[in-house]
Amino acid sequence: MRIVLLTALACLPLIGQAAEPCPWLNAATAGGVLGGPITRATTRRAATGDDASCEFIRQDGSPLFELRIEVETMSSAAKDFASYAARCHSAAVPLKAIGNEALACSDGQLAEQVVGRVRDRVFLIRIGTNDRSAQPAELRDKARKIAEQVAGILF
């Protein structure tokens, strides 16, 4: 009996543990960007370093809204950033005053993204939805604002 009680007490901290938070954005801010409460948030950290990816999802019936943030360390920023910038399949628009360099582009009909870097760290911000009434300009503006926040934290 004593062993069962001690085991239960030892496991108690694990029961109350919250999911690991995103280092660059909290769920409340993500919910404000996506227009309502977040229904699922996931953070995946790299095995080494401070790299991570965060995903926030708001599902309101059939419309789905998603915000994804990825941050990775590059071994050579001068060479490696070009491969990340190539993720912009459409005409990329340079964004001023966000990190060392940043580009905004469409990622399909209902998604906008920003790819940028701060020193040797690259970041990708992607906001997408399946809601056909979503305005690409609004999505791009939201992605830009989150990129400003992430770049500021990375400085």
Image (cartoon, grey):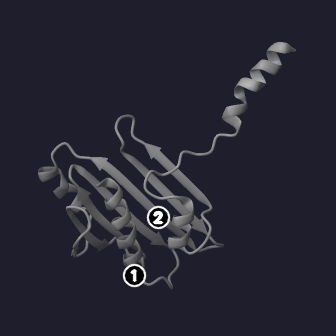
Q: Which residue is mark 1?
A: 136
Q: Does 103 sit above or below residue 133?
A: above
Residue 52 left/right relative to 10: left
Residue 89 left/right relative to 128: left
Which element carries disc 2, helix, strand or loop? strand
The CA span between labels 2 and 1 is 14 Å
Residue 54: x and y in percent read 46, 53
Q: Amino acid at mark 2?
A: Leu
Residue at image point 71% right, 24% down: 10
Q: Does 105 sit above or below residue 135?
A: above
Q: Quadrant of residue 86?
A: bottom left
Q: Does 55 sit above or below residue 45?
A: below
Q: In what quadrant of the picture does the N terminus appear?
A: top right
Residue 70: x and y in percent read 37, 54
Q: Does 13 sit above or below residue 102?
A: above
For disc 1, the neighbor class at 10 Å (few under 14, some 14 to 19, many from 20) is some
Residue 155: x and y in percent read 28, 55
Residue 87 left/right relative to 79: right
CB under 8 Å between callouts 2 and 1?
no
Q: Nearer the viewer, residue 43 or 131?
A: 43
For the question of whether residue 112 can be seen, the reply is: no
Q: Which residue is mark 2?
A: 67
Q: Quadrant of residue 116?
A: bottom left
Number of marks drawn: 2
- The answer to which of marks 2 and 1 sits earlier in the sequence is 2
Q: Could you say which disc has been placed on residue 153 in the image? A: none
Residue 117: x and y in percent read 24, 58
Residue at image point 37% right, 77% down: 140
Q: Quadrant of residue 12?
A: top right
Q: Amino acid at mark 1?
A: Pro
Which element carries disc 1, helix, strand or loop? helix
